[in-house]
Amino acid sequence: MERHLEQSLALPFGEKELEEIVNLVFDGDFDTVHRPIRETVADPLFDRRDGLTMTEQGRLAYERIRLIHQHAGCAEEVIRDARRLFALSEWPALMDTTTLPLLTVHYNLCLATILEHGRGRDDLQDYIDELSSMRTIGMFMVTELGWGNNAAALQTRAEYDRATDEFVINTPHLQAQKFMPFTGIPNIPKLAVVMARLMIDGTDQGIFPFIIRISDEHGLLPQVRASALPEKSGLALDNGVTWFDHVRVPRRNFLGGTMGHLTPKGEFVSSMRGRRRRLFAALERVHAGRLCLSSALVAAGRASVYTAVEHGFRRHTFAPARDDVPVLAYRSQQTALFRALAHVYAMTFLINHTKRAFLRSPEDEQTKQLIAIAKAVTSWTITDVLTTCRERIGAQGMFAANHIAEYIAMAQGVVTAEGDNLPLLAKAGGKLMADPGPHPRPAPPTGHSGLTDPYYHLALLRHRNTVVGQRATHSMRREIRNGATVFSAWNAHINVAVDLAHDHGKSVALQSFAEVLPHIRAPRVRWALRLLASIYALDVTRQHAAWYLTHGLITPDQADRIPALIERLCSLLLPDAQLLVSGFGLTDEFLRAPVLSPALSAFRATPRVDHE
């Protein structure tokens, strides 16, 4: 009887139910886009190898990305099909986090930038061929040691030499060193797109991309200098600081694209007014890169929740008046992990929504803002998810072989890479303050079901954003009228802007989640995802419960009930937990994590095949 009760914690599920969840998680692309890449990552080359130095791990990562490249097909087709580009970011990183920056930089930032800004130029074909074959690894050098996210202030110079019709790339001082490109392992052939300030006859024309060969199989090329940076926990990337000592490159290595060109007489001509606009155009591929990073981190969140939930069913512990029970029988474990599960699904639907927006209109300004907000919201949310999962599998969570500890290190990189979260949200929040949108005061919920309605919580959050945004905007304008500088007025409200953008991302996630529910065919799947949507919605509202109380939008009784209601919904989710994590397209065999070894699998639920 005891054993039967424990086994019934997770109910078996049918193939059709599983198929529908997989279809929702991967937006209908699992079989055509994701499965082939997952099968490549199942190759033994991705098996865990302990005892390697950081340099050996780094070299192994380069081997692995070459394997991915061999199976991915034509590099130019991968770049044109953004869905494949995103999937290439997701699956390899689950087994080797170092592959994420290597793949995204090679395909999206280096090769795609050359293709985009060198469109129609036959003189660049040799560079394109060696990058497309991955005989040479692509790099992208923007950030400088002294300027961080402030790309407009970059100091690396590209002086045009009229006498030789060449550009001379030079690092004028230590603060202008390129910070964190992949130059720590010097004897791998690498070609970089380097952002440098174009100088013609002493006149600054703005920042443009240039192609520079960094290294070959013998090491760094002459006049290219690099120093390896210290090791980073969980990420064996060969980062370095890099500087150029009057490196000469031919005219063809200038990637002016639509931003501008040099006439045969060496005069700069541009139909794009403003150096800042030209800089943004040069960095256009950054937006797709942010989406690649977000997609990979959400995938890591799914893998972590899968591991923690499966472990929770298999790992037994003591219980009052019982011999033992699975740890997931405890409400404390359920509430923590199923809240994490709800947040992972919300971030999955947010990223799917953002991917679709990018596929429809990649150059639209609202799409770019959505990508920036989604990058920040997903990376912060998944960081919390990873920490929860690491703790909930106990000491097992500390071992790199079980992946979660390495995902946490990857998450810290994503928070900072491709634009740090805070500047991204501050910029987006400033735009939201200027136009917060009309969202009327929501009607109070009626009864128990009203408080679990995701759309009610969405209305609450949108109303709050409208009120807070309008107040902040009016306050800023008043301060400026009273003599404050624009900077001091903005600085006094920058935290409000960051919070507004963060909450806007949560509202998009909640809406994306809620919009999925009516289209689900299988009743069990619809029930389980509705529970998750309600858990996420209640969690979002709980964060601002004091504000809603102060403004009369919820009652003290409702605010007091939210924690218990979340716990109750989590307990109802228990029978469907394995169905929900099975929808992530993951298996024990794929993850190869010791914590998922067969010795702990006594209570694993297996799919039930429905016979009609």
Image: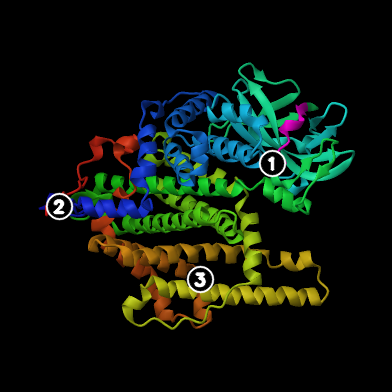
C-alpha span from label 3 to label 1: 36 Å
Residue identified by numbered label 3: 544
Q: How crowded is mark 3: few (under 14 residues within 10 Å), some or many (20 or more)?
A: some
Which quarter of the figure is the C terminus placed in? bottom left
Which amino acid, mark 1? Thr
Determine the residue positioned at 66% across, 73% down: 472
Residue identified by numbered label 2: 610
Which residues, given as a range, are shown in magenta? 248-256
Q: How many marks?
A: 3
Mark in the foreground, 3 or 1: 1
Determine the residue positioned at 50% across, 72% down: 461
C-alpha span from label 2 to label 3: 44 Å
Q: Toward the viewer: 204 or 564? A: 204
**Mark 2 or 1 closer to N-term?**
1
Q: Residue 143 carries which label?
A: 1
C-alpha span from label 2 to label 1: 55 Å
Q: Report if residue 204 lies within the magenta region.
A: no
Q: Toward the viewer: 507 or 165? A: 165
**Disc 2, SS:** loop
Quadrant of res 519: bottom left
